[in-house]
Amino acid sequence: DGGITQSPKYLFRKEGQNVTLSCEQNLNHDAMYWYRQDPGQGLRLIYYSQIVNDFQKGDIAEGYSVSREKKESFPLTVTSAQKNPTAFYLCATGGLGYNEQFFGPGTRLTVL
Amino acid sequence: AQSVSQHNHHVILSEAASLELGCNYSYGGTVNLFWYVQYPGQHLQLLLKYFSGDPLVKGIKGFEAEFIKSKFSFNLRKPSVQWSDTAEYFCAAENYGGSQGNLIFGKGTKLSVKP
């Protein structure tokens, strides 16, 4: 929505498997972000990237990895090292001169 | 560490009641402040924002928020809520001059409006 696509909407994986969540944007924004949303916890920043081929860890990066090979794309991999991966994952973007962020529809990951 | 606190976890109101949701932040310097809303089944969207100037900011759907620097607060208000305001509301802060666009979010307040 609003130029940010996250797929799939729902994702199920077995414990011990890595899984990659997709985030694509056509807003031409430089910055992209990944958050994790848990009930009663608000949004917590996992990783962010302000330019292509560069990214930084957020507050809860352990067990996650990202890449930023293209401006439009910022995939998030949830690895088997993430102890509690079941959550709602939100991707966001921000442009130069924007301080606000724009959010995608999210992916709900359930690890069985 | 920088933080944003939202005092109410769940607020239940009847239609036409007035709303005030509390938000406090811990930054000592200049700060940009935001309220986001997440309606059921929809993605997070910006309700309003404060960067500078008039401390009373107006947002979409009749919401407003007041920045009180001395109290480190940015409370959200609406004089008369509607059933369609049922949603989760998040306060967020950006440390001006920090990494651009990096926001710290509160834990959210769930608002339920009874018809």
Image (cartoon, coloured by chain):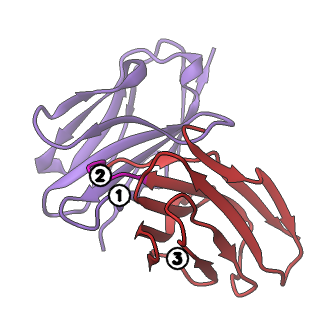
**Residue B11 painted magenta:** no
Chain B in the picture: what colour? Answer: purple
Report the span colored magenta.
A94-98
- The verdict on a common chain for dots 1 and 2 is yes
Q: Position of residue A22 (x, y in %)?
A: 68, 61
Amino acid marked by disc 3: Ile
Q: Is residue A96 magenta?
A: yes
Query: Depth check: B55 or A11 in front?
Result: A11
Q: Which mark is residue A60?
A: 3
Q: Is residue A59 left or right of residue A7?
A: left
Return the chain for callout 1: B
Q: Is residue B111 visible?
A: no
- Residue at x-position 43% and y-position 19%: B61
What's the amino acid at mark 1?
Answer: Val
The residue pinned by badge 1 equals B4
Residue sitting at 38 percent across and 18 percent down?
B62
| Disc number placed over residue B24 in the picture, else none | 2
Question: In this rendering, which labeled residue sits more in front, label 2 or label 3?
Answer: 3
Residue A29, label in figure = none
Marks 1 and 2 in Cβ contact (< 8 Å): yes
The picture quadrant where one finds residue A81 is: bottom right
Mark 2 or mark 1, which is nearer the start of the sequence? 1
Q: Nearer the viewer, residue A25 or B21?
A: A25
Residue B18 in view here: yes
Distance in Å between CA atoms under marks 3 and 1: 17 Å
Does label 1 lie on the same chain as label 3? Answer: no
Q: Chain of mark 2?
A: B
